[in-house]
Image (cartoon, rainbow, N blue to C red):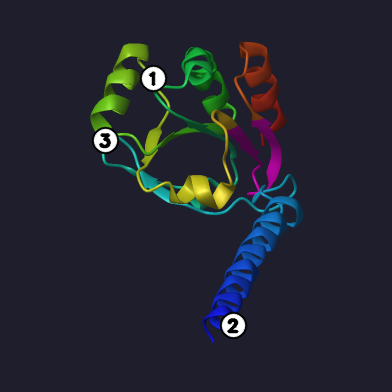
């Protein structure tokens, strides 16, 4: 009786393991990790900036929106921020907004970074990574170019040069 019981338990364990393996393979090969695609409507979100002002993506309809996901610890992010800051006043006048979405860091860390680079565009913090998850962001930095109708025009993964940022901003001028 003990041998039969051990055999049943071993078979049950193997079935669970094969089930877990099958599920893992399914997730990795058959489900797209990219949640937001070019041409799709950008998921709406509302986050608070360091001054306590609420920024909701849908409030920017009619404007182009350059949504940049970043972190203070991210070296490519640190390199592109001054370029974004330099181009911001010119493109704000043309109807393009830059929203820098920090990924889950403390207000103190983000505020220190913003002050160091004297950033003029809105810097908002996704404290619970809800927006990052909704967009499927990985790795940082990641930039989503959203046109005046709220559709994703282009997705740029990785650090951007000043030329890349300028070309991207031009793409979403309304």
Mark 2 and mark 3: Cα distance apart in space = 68 Å
- Is 32 left or right of 83, judged from the image as shown? right
* Image position, residue 17 (x, y; %): 61, 63
Relative height, residue 56 to residue 23 (above, below): above
Dominant secondary-structure state across the stretch colored magenta: strand
| Outermost left residue | 108
The residue shown at (57%, 37%) is 138
Q: Nearer the viewer, residue 137 or 125?
A: 137
Disc 2 and disc 1 in contact, CB within 8 angstroms = no
Q: Name the residue carrying label 1.
A: 119
Q: Name the residue carrying label 3.
A: 51
Of the image marks 2 and 1, the number of the one nearer the N terminus: 2
- Magenta residues span 143-156
Q: Name the residue carrying label 2.
A: 4
User: Helix, strand, or loop for circle 1?
Assistant: loop
Residue 67 magenta-drawn?
A: no
């Amino acid at each position: 009786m003990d041998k039969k019981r051990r055999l049943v338990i071993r078979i049950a364990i193997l079935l669970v393991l094969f089930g877990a393996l099958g599920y893992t393979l399914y997730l990795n090969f058959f489900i797209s990790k990219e949640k937001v695609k070019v041409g799709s409507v950008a998921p709406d979100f509302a986050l608070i900036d360091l001054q306590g002002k609420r920024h909701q993506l849908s409030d920017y309809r009619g404007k182009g929106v350059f949504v940049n996901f970043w972190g203070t610890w991210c070296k490519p992010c640190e390199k592109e921020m001054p370029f974004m800051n330099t181009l911001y006043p010119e493109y704000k006048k043309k109807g393009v907004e830059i929203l820098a979405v920090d990924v889950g860091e403390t207000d103190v860390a983000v505020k220190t970074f913003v002050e160091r680079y004297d950033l003029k565009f809105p810097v908002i913090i996704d404290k619970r990574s809800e927006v990052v998850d909704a967009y499927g962001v990985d790795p940082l930095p990641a930039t989503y170019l959203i046109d005046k109708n709220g559709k994703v025009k282009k997705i740029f993964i990785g650090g951007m040069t000043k030329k890349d940022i300028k070309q991207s901003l031009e793409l979403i001028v309304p």
